Amino acid sequence: MIFSKQIKKRIIDVAYSANKGHIGSALSISDLITGIFNWMKSIEELDEQKCSLTLSKGHAALALYCCLNELNVISDKDLFEYEQNGTLLGTHPDPALPWVNFFGGSLGQGLAFAAGLAMGDKLSQKSRTHYVILSDSELNAGVVWEIAAIVGTRKVNNLIVLIDMNKQQALDLTKNIIKYEDIATSFRVLGWLVTELDGHNEDEILNALATKSDKPHVIIANTKFGAGISFMEGNISWHYLPLTKDLYELALREIDS
């Protein structure tokens, strides 16, 4: 089992070592991505032929890398070469890596990519579940809603989307960019099963992932940007800021507490 506290600490370690790393965004999805991997392990489907993962929110890739390190897929040496010349572990995930099938650099495109995989599997009668981590700011992209309508109409029920609802973007609150009043209702009327939950509660995440449906499933996960670290939570500056030594040590203490 992957423990989210360990993933958060490793995110901080690697980001401090690299002096960069979209830290707040990686912490925001840390419980979601550990939940997905723990769920796949629990049903003995930690196999890319049985499940796929699309990190549409590609700039949060450090959380993915840390999970792959915990699973012994990425070595400590490779992990701590994050963002160095020649590494595959860049700001956005590279499909040359295991569990990466989409670059995730162009926000709003990951859902379309994963939906294509899911629909292709349906046509070829291949049994595989497709998980997508989508940021709430990606709902600004029209293609997300076009694909949501298509897969809802066609009942593509091998597709599970987790929306990282941290309510902010790189430079402002999401509501100040494009405002959506009721995302859950929007997906329901397009033919989706909708679950709303605490995006930092693994029991709730695992229970939602276990839900069976004849519809595509969207999990609206209420999360905190910079989760677990008081000076980062809800602070847009930590979309880009690096850690000083003092803040690095403080962040580790707060995660441990």
Image: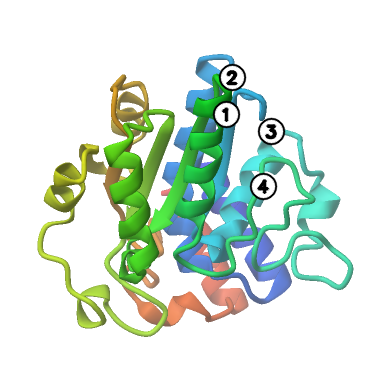
Name the residue beneath numbered marker 3: 71
Q: For this view, does 75 lie left or right of residue 60?
A: right
Name the residue beneath numbered marker 2: 45
Q: Residues within 10 Å of mark 2 (few under 14, many from 20)?
A: some
Name the residue: 61% across, 70% down.
21
Disc 3 versus disc 2: distance between alpha carbons? 14 Å
Disc 4 versus disc 3: distance between alpha carbons? 14 Å
Q: Who comes first in sequence, dot 4 or dot 3?
A: 3
Disc 2 versus disc 4: distance between alpha carbons? 16 Å
Name the residue beneath numbered marker 4: 100
205 vs 156, nearest the viewer:
156
Name the residue beneath numbered marker 1: 51
Name the residue: 66% across, 68% down.
91
Where does the image place residue 250, in percent across and percent down from the top left?
A: 49, 66
Where does the image place residue 42, in percent across and percent down from the top left?
A: 51, 17
**For residue 218, what is the image quadrant?**
top left
Disc 4 versus disc 1: distance between alpha carbons? 11 Å
Amino acid beneath label 1? Cys
Disc 1 versus disc 2: distance between alpha carbons? 7 Å
Where does the image place residue 248, in percent across and percent down from the top left?
A: 57, 69
Where does the image place residue 56, in percent across and percent down from the top left?
A: 51, 57
Q: Residues within 10 Å of mark 4 (few under 14, many from 20)?
A: some
Q: Residue furthest right?
A: 86
Instruction: Check the image and report above or below for 227 versus 71.
Output: below
Name the residue: 39% across, 63% down.
143
Q: For this view, does 83 lie left or right of residue 132?
A: right
Amino acid beneath label 2? Glu
Q: Residues within 10 Å of mark 1 (few under 14, many from 20)?
A: some
